[in-house]
Image (cartoon, grey):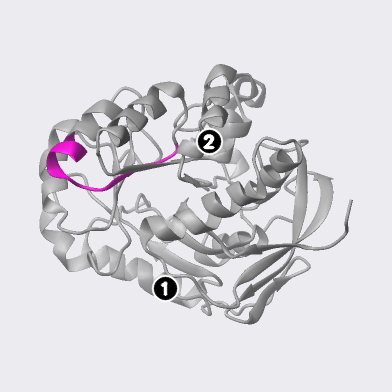
Amino acid sequence: MTNELIRLPGLVDIHVHLRDPGQTHKENFLSGTSAALAGGFTSVFDMPNNAVAVTSAVILQEKLASARRQIVCDTGFYFGSLGDNLDEFAKVADQVWGLKLYLNVTTGGYKIDADYLQRIFAAWQSDKPILLHAEADVISTALQVAEETGQRVHVCHVSCRAELEPILAARAAGVKVTCGVTPHHLFLNEADGRRLGTFGAVKPELKPQVDLDYLWEHLTDIDVVESDHAPHTVAEKEAGTFGFPGLETTLPLLLQAEREGRLTREDIVAKCATNPRALVGLTGEADTFVEVEPLEFEITAAGMKSRAGWTPYAGRTGFGRVKRVTQRGAVVYEDGKILAAPGSGRIV
């Protein structure tokens, strides 16, 4: 095995929860974007289900102000809706990268009634995507509304055959739909969930191995890998809170899967860099890349930048430690140290 560093473009995660403002004991913009750099991600996109949901222009500005003081990698944001803030859409459309809707129960309780979808979709007068948390029980309804309105949608964290099959059928029928998969829905099954106990609680839930096999078999049909980085403290996980941290484990899990012949280096670049950029419309940057040491190691939470302090992958084998991250020609991370100053990342 060669010791030559693996060089990758700066990775992009279109689905993270940085918890700031409102729940910074779990994560803040500084710790979350530090975790991103440590995982090889130079751009991340933060979801709106904060303690106070980002559903107004005023709340969005407060969130942007906090981010500007702290971020060490490029960060973009999505807007949220429960169906009662449609007049806010025009105020924020040029400041966010899409609209996120929750059709199933998850952290924060921001679940909307599917009956609101038609008017929300119609009110989103933007070519930026509507991102959906839509599991098997509601996915067909959501895709039908997307077809009727002509809106571009992205289905987050596809977890099983019953979710992916309707997406592929809709795509074949001309619906403008993309989808993503998380590492935990590729690498952890329901048996792992039972083993992990409350630390295995996540939405969508971990699925039987047959569903993981289906996702792997159809990996070429899935547009992006998205971490759904959702940090909670150990105490909160002991209480059964939903969500896993994932920014620092996504790349080593994928590189290990490459070694096992489950995907290619080209797949990793496409699903963690090229496709995410294209999906949200983020332009590429010169002199932005990641250098990775080709090392096998046991995954632990020790030394991670995230405030979560735990990982559901503890004890698993990962491959590839991020050695250095260069963004726009400047080294921003090297040998476990964040070299970028707080606030030096860009709001994109």
Q: Magenta stretch?
A: 145-157
At label 1, counting other C-alpha atoms closer than 10 Å, the crowd grade (few under 14, some 14-19, many 20 or more) is some
Element at label 2: helix
Closer to the camera in the image, 222 or 93: 222
Closer to the camera in the image, 240 or 281: 281
Which disc is residue 219 wearing? 2
Whether residue 310 is visible: no
Q: Residue at x 79, y 63 (%)?
A: 5
Residue 2 image offset from top left, x and y in percent: 88, 56
Element at label 1: loop
In the rendered view, tell whether residue 345 sits above or below residue 31: below
In the shown orientation, is residue 236 left or right of residue 172?
right
Q: CA distance from mark 1 to mark 2?
A: 31 Å
Question: Looking at the rendering, which quadrant does residue 82 occupy?
Answer: top left
Question: What amino acid is labelled 2 in the image?
Answer: Leu
Q: Residue at x 16, y 54 (%)?
A: 124
Residue 271 image offset from top left, x and y in percent: 53, 49
Q: Which residue is mark 1?
A: 347
In the rendered view, tell whether residue 256 sits above or below residue 2: above
- Quadrant of the image containing the C terminus: bottom left
Question: What amino acid is labelled 1 in the image?
Answer: Ile
Q: Mark 1 or mark 2, which is nearer to you?
A: 2
At label 2, counting other C-alpha atoms closer than 10 Å, the crowd grade (few under 14, some 14-19, many 20 or more) is some
Which disc is residue 213 wearing? none
Q: Residue at x 50, y 35 (%)?
A: 241
> Which badge, 1 or 2, is on the more N-terminal residue?
2
In the shown orientation, is residue 150 left or right of residue 318?
left
Q: Is residue 153 magenta?
A: yes
In the shown orientation, is residue 79 left or right of residue 339?
left
